[in-house]
Amino acid sequence: MQGARRIIAQTRLAACYDADKFMDVKRILLLGGTGGAVVVWLASAATTTRPVVRPAALPRARVIEASGAELSSEIARLHDRLRPQAVPTENRDLFRYSSRRATAVAAPAPQAAPVELLAPAVPMPSVKLIGMADDVAIISGAGELLMVRVGDAVTPRFRVAAISPTSVDLQDVNDHSTLHLSLK
């Protein structure tokens, strides 16, 4: 029994706190002062010291007139910016870093033929060879799918002149020129 009493007495001495003593006054003041300083610091950061300036109350009509005038001046500025009056005097090359001037002599421009001598250009048909069968070519164009043989008309202007395993030759009935279509 004495051994148990001795162990109990030793554990009382080994306790990390003493129930009879309170926290001393220095610690209380230090913790309270530090906590109060943090609270004051946070409160001062959250508020502003500048006075709030309220604008003078204008009548509603003056406010509308002022905003209308600002809007019209802004619209005029944007119109000027969209259609600049100044034309650039130099052709700027965005791919050169220096401002060297080209010294090459420009060749004289060829004389254009008189308009009445030029024949009107006839547009080429928009046809495409999309497939082949034994002796039949499958051509698409103008929203149609045509299966043609040698001698058949593709358009009123072109007829099939020859068919090979990978291409078709179309001949113009007006000037007898040849248009070659091939599979891609």
Image (cartoon, rainbow, N blue to C red):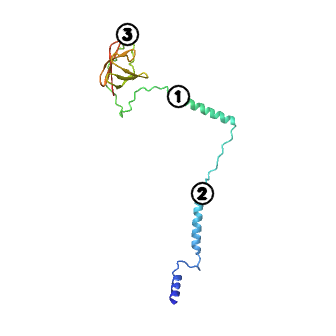
Task: Verify CB contact (< 8 Å) between mark 2 and mark 1.
Answer: no
Earlier along the polypeptide chain: callout 2 or callout 1? 2
Residue nearest the observer in this picture, 54 or 67 = 67
Q: Quadrant of residue 54?
A: top right
For the point 63% across and 35% down, the residue is 67
Residue of label 3: 117
Residue of label 1: 80
Q: Secondary structure at mark 2?
A: helix
Mark 1, Cα crowd under 10 Å, few <14 / some 14-19 / many 20+, is: few
Q: Nearer the viewer, mark 1 or mark 3?
A: 3
Mark 3, Cα crowd under 10 Å, few <14 / some 14-19 / many 20+, is: few
Q: Nearer the viewer, mark 3 or mark 2?
A: 3
Alpha carbons under labels 1 and 3: distance apart? 44 Å
Name the amino acid, label 1.
Asp
Seen in the picture, residue 84 relative to 13 is either above or below; the reply is above
- Left or right? Give the position of 45 relative to 164: right
Earlier along the polypeptide chain: callout 3 or callout 2? 2
What numbered label is drawn on residue 101? none
Alpha carbons under labels 2 and 1: distance apart? 50 Å
Residue nearest the observer in this picture, 170 or 30 = 170
Residue of label 2: 44
For the point 64% across and 34% down, the residue is 66
For the point 63% across and 32% down, the residue is 68
Name the amino acid, label 2.
Ser
